[in-house]
């Protein structure tokens, strides 16, 4: 919905002033109070570092690497999570068979899988993607399941009476659209978790490129201005992905819903 | 052709936990002529909805059978359309796409189906709203669309489960008038469940009055009023009085 940041800034003077004010305080505190680039790099330092990584081109390779890891994770989580959630939500027996396994695996923090990610995939993109996948797959499974479980009975019966009686058709024409708001809410939660896992996976040495890796690398070099650039970059890219997703969902997928859903 | 024969239909619901049984229907039999308008009327919990759901193929009887043109009903079929009491339009489809749903299921192309259902949209007066989503419609319009959706499959029998139950009194009267117009044009057999005596007297050729649980047939009343009917004529009032007395007996028999 709030896709146009610039328009938003024009209309929302108070919000814009607030951000400018916060930056001013930051700059003042770093320059005059802390006076230590290790403890708190100033806004100006961060801007300079930002242009430095643009000039060197590092920003592009690292962003693309991180996005690649994220894409591998998201694709795998979709491919596994949505079919599993559908099976569990539609067939009682499948739910009874799969649910115990999921309940055991789910509480394991995704980052605990890092050693196995390295052993199984080595220091590859797939390895970081795997950690992202572990973080994303459970919210997707659970929300797909919930959505399928809550398909109103009257819609299923109406469809049957209208000649839609096969399970495949009922899933495709009734259950999936009906469960879509829940599935999308799950994807949004999953993207938040996955984004965190991405950084952690790259930091803990699953990758030698990427935004998370750069944070850790620059910490070793004591270049906290660069650390902060990458932190902000992660924040902004995450925000952008979320906004873009919401815009797409609200205008394309869930236009039939009144008001905002997710 | 839509001749319906209900033959000795019984339905017992059993609970697994305490092995208790609820007898919802007991030995219900009646015949419905092709093109007839039948109302099923009875105290709440008398099994009239269960009977309708068995006719739709959404529920199974414990014994007996329901035949459509001599063929036993075993499952849902587009030949028997159904309109539910709850709003049952698919909220993710626009009005027109709801109405084309049945044709799409039969393999008709979407563009072709849209052309075919235009006349039904016109019939229920929703031309202006055909591209709206259900949440944008009032309750009365949603039920109109649900009727058009059921008609689009060209059913032989239309099963209606208190379709106007959730509407306000005025909208309900308007929809009753419109439903009768549709019935005259399309000449489908109607099985209409209601708890409203007024509705039954205004709409039907015959009223099947049922007893309280277990549901049996108490009496089948022929409504010999000329159409178009007046809601307040003395004859209609007499008939209403008669039906109300039958229902009152049931209240004391419980």
Image (spheres, rainbow, N blue to C red):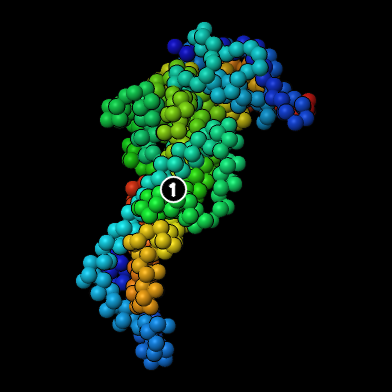
Q: Does residue B33 appear anywhere in the picture? A: no
The image quadrant of residue B46 is top right
User: Number of marks in the image?
Assistant: 1
Q: Is residue A59 left or right of residue A221?
A: left
In the image, residue B193 above or below residue A217: above
Between A180 and B42, the one nearer to me in the picture: A180
The image shows residue B130 at horizontal and vertical percentages of: 34, 38
**Which element is circle 1 on?**
helix
Q: Chain of mark 1?
A: A
List x then y, in percent, for residue B195. Answer: 62, 30
* Left or right: A199, with B117 as reference point: right
Quadrant where the N terminus of chain B sits is: top left
Determine which residue is flagged by label 1: A120
Q: Residue at x 52, y 34 (%)?
A: A90
Position of the C terminus of chain B by quadrant: top right
Of all residues, the one furthest to the left in this rendering is: A55
């Amino acid at each position: 919905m709030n896709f146009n940041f610039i328009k938003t800034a024009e209309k929302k003077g108070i919000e814009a002033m607030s951000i400018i004010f916060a930056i001013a305080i930051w700059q003042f505190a770093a320059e005059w109070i802390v006076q230590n680039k290790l403890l708190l790099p100033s806004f100006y330092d961060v801007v300079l570092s930002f242009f430095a990584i643009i000039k060197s081109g590092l920003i592009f390779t690292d962003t693309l690497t991180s996005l690649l890891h994220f894409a591998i994770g998201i694709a795998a989580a979709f491919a596994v999570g949505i079919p599993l959630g559908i099976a569990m939500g539609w067939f009682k027996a499948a739910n009874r068979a799969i649910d115990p396994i999921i309940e055991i695996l789910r509480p394991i923090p995704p980052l605990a899988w890092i050693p196995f990610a390295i052993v199984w995939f080595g220091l590859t993109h797939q390895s970081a993607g795997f950690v992202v996948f572990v973080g994303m797959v459970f919210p997707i499974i659970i929300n797909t399941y919930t959505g399928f479980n809550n398909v109103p009975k009257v819609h299923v019966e109406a469809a049957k009476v209208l000649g839609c009686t096969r399970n495949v058709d009922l899933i495709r024409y009734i259950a999936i659209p009906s469960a879509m708001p829940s599935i999308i809410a799950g994807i949004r939660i999953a993207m938040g978790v996955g984004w965190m896992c991405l950084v952690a996976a790259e930091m803990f040495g699953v990758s030698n490129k990427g935004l998370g890796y750069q944070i850790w690398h620059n910490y070793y070099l004591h270049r906290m201005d660069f650390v902060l650039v990458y932190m902000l970059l992660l924040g902004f890219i995450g925000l952008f992905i979320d906004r873009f997703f919401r815009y797409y969902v609200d205008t394309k997928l869930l236009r039939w819903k009144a008001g905002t859903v997710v | 052709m839509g001749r319906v024969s209900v033959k000795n239909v019984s339905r017992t619901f059993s609970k697994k936990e305490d092995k208790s049984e609820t007898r919802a229907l007991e030995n219900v039999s009646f015949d419905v002529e092709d093109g007839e308008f039948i109302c099923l009327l009875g105290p709440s919990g008398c099994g009239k909805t269960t009977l309708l759901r068995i006719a739709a193929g959404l529920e199974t009887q414990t014994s007996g059978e329901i035949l459509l043109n001599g063929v036993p009903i075993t499952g849902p079929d587009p030949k028997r359309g159904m309109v539910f009491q709850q709003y049952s339009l698919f909220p993710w489809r626009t009005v027109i796409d709801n109405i084309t749903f049945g044709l799409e299921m039969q393999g008709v192309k979407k563009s072709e189906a849209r052309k075919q259902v235009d006349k039904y949209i016109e019939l229920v007066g929703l031309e202006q709203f055909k591209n709206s989503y259900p949440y944008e419609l009032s309750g009365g319009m949603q039920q109109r669309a649900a009727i058009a959706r059921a008609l689009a499959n060209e059913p032989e029998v239309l099963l209606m489960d208190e379709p106007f139950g959730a509407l306000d009194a005025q909208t309900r009267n308007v929809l009753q008038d419109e439903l009768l117009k549709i019935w005259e044009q399309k000449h489908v057999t109607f099985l209409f469940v209601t708890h409203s005596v007024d509705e039954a007297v205004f709409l039907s050729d015959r009223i099947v009055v049922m007893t309280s649980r277990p549901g049996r047939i108490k009496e089948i009343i022929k409504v010999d009023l000329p159409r178009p009917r007046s809601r307040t004529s003395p004859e209609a009032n007499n008939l209403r009085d008669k039906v109300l007395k039958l229902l009152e007996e049931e209240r004391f028999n419980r």
